[in-house]
Image (spheres, rainbow, N blue to C red):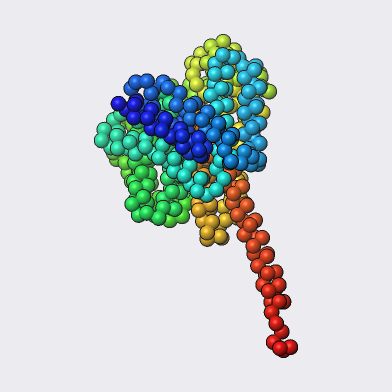
Amino acid sequence: MRDIVLALFIFGTLPCILMRPYIGLLVWSWLGYMNPHRLCYGFAVSFPWVYLVAVVTIASLLFSKESKKIPWSAVSVLLLMFLLWTGLTTFYAMVPDSAWIKWQEFAKVMVMVFVTLILVNNRERLHWLVWMIVVSLGFYGVKGGVFTLVQGGANHVLGPPGSFIADNNALALALCMTLPLMRYLQLHSSSKFVHVGLGFSMLFTGIAILGTYSRGGLIGLAIVAGALFVKSRGRLAVVLVIVVVGFAGSHFMPAQWTARMGTLHNAQQTDSGETRIQSWQFSANVALHRPLLGGGFNVYQSTPAWESYGPEDAIPRAVHSIYFRVLGEQGFLGLALFAALLFASWKNCSRVRKRSRDIPDMRWAFDMASMLQVSLVAFMAAGTFLPMSYFDLSFQLMALSAVLAEFCMQQIRSRQLLELRAPKELTARAGKLPNPIRG
């Protein structure tokens, strides 16, 4: 029954997508982040819903009256360069079959990132896309928080099986990146019910991150808490959430959770900490021997590569660091492009914050830029210990930073032109008035 309901709903949205491609972007984001089909039990689990919606959305965009122009900026140029570079490294990959499969997955995500750049061109569309991201990932935050409280923190919180966030570490990172977006929506909600609901969602999401048992997630949560306090307005609500989540972590979570988090003090002496360091050494060695093109996607899956580039007695595993993974797979130039993308996205948000800070009716842009920065901080900090280099949410948030900067700069330029024209128009009107002395 669940499969049939989901199928009817998605097929029912296709006519709407054909008329309005932006709806397709929202549905694609919902399917990509929430993965509702992974919660089914029959034919819907393996059906390519995301691909179907993406194809219909692109077809709708091509035949619609929507502008097809990509707003070129530092971020959009770097996104294209990074996509092309990963395609080049895939030609020379050490694990070619696996690398091509991974590149095709990444390319499909990047196509929709460029669709985001094209279609999200005003405040309302920005706002609703953020809502879709929050609803999709916040579902697992609230559900995981309730599960953790009911189970007494005894069991791990996991994402939907077979999805990008199935692993506890991946889910923890996604939830850390979602928390600031919840705060943005809370700051700009006119409904008291929605405002309170988002506050509780933040609380449960913080508890869910604890329930994942992810040490990288705990580090990310601590950094996000600090960044939210610094970047957010109305800090009382943030402080209350931080205090309650901190209390839950120190007094509610069981002994096995405390023991696992305690290994952060001596990570090198734990098995997982040692294998993480070994994977970083492996990636660095691959990059040093293949500095231009790296080893290609999924080079860590090659046993001969580990024998050649891994430390002695190393245990082959995924590279748990967004930076070292890109370094090993895409080489030094690939890592430079990746770092430049993060830097350019951050600078976009800083520029919006600086230009909109003192404009009351652009307070929303100031807050969105602030919360996008906190989400990027979560990705950059927690990602240091997690293998999520190609997480689709991170690239879509980069695109949103470019869209926000472009839209805000247009609004500010229009405002400045109006302010310059106003005195001239008043002077011109005054010149046309009859002279009272002559009369």
- Dividing the picture into quadrants, the one containing residue 60 is top right
* Res. 312 visible in picture: no
In-front residue for pair 422/314: 422
Judge left or right: residue 134 versus residue 287.
Answer: left
Residue 336 rendering spot, x and y as whole percentages: 64, 32
Residue 97 rendering spot, x and y as whole percentages: 56, 14
In-front residue for pair 135/96: 135
Judge left or right: residue 6 versus residue 113.
Answer: left
Judge left or right: residue 56 versus residue 212.
Answer: right
Q: Which quadrant does the N terminus fall into? A: top left
Q: Which residue is drawn at the image coordinates 37% and 35% (left, top)?
A: 140
Q: Which residue is drawn at the image coordinates 67% and 72% (left, top)?
A: 426
Q: Is residue 276 above or below residue 62?
A: above
In-front residue for pair 46/189: 46
Q: How many marks?
A: 0
Residue 335 rendering spot, x and y as whole percentages: 62, 30
Q: Which residue is drawn at the image coordinates 56% and 60% (left, top)?
A: 358
Q: Is residue 336 above or below residue 43?
A: below
Q: Which residue is drawn at the image coordinates 49% and 26% (left, top)?
A: 51
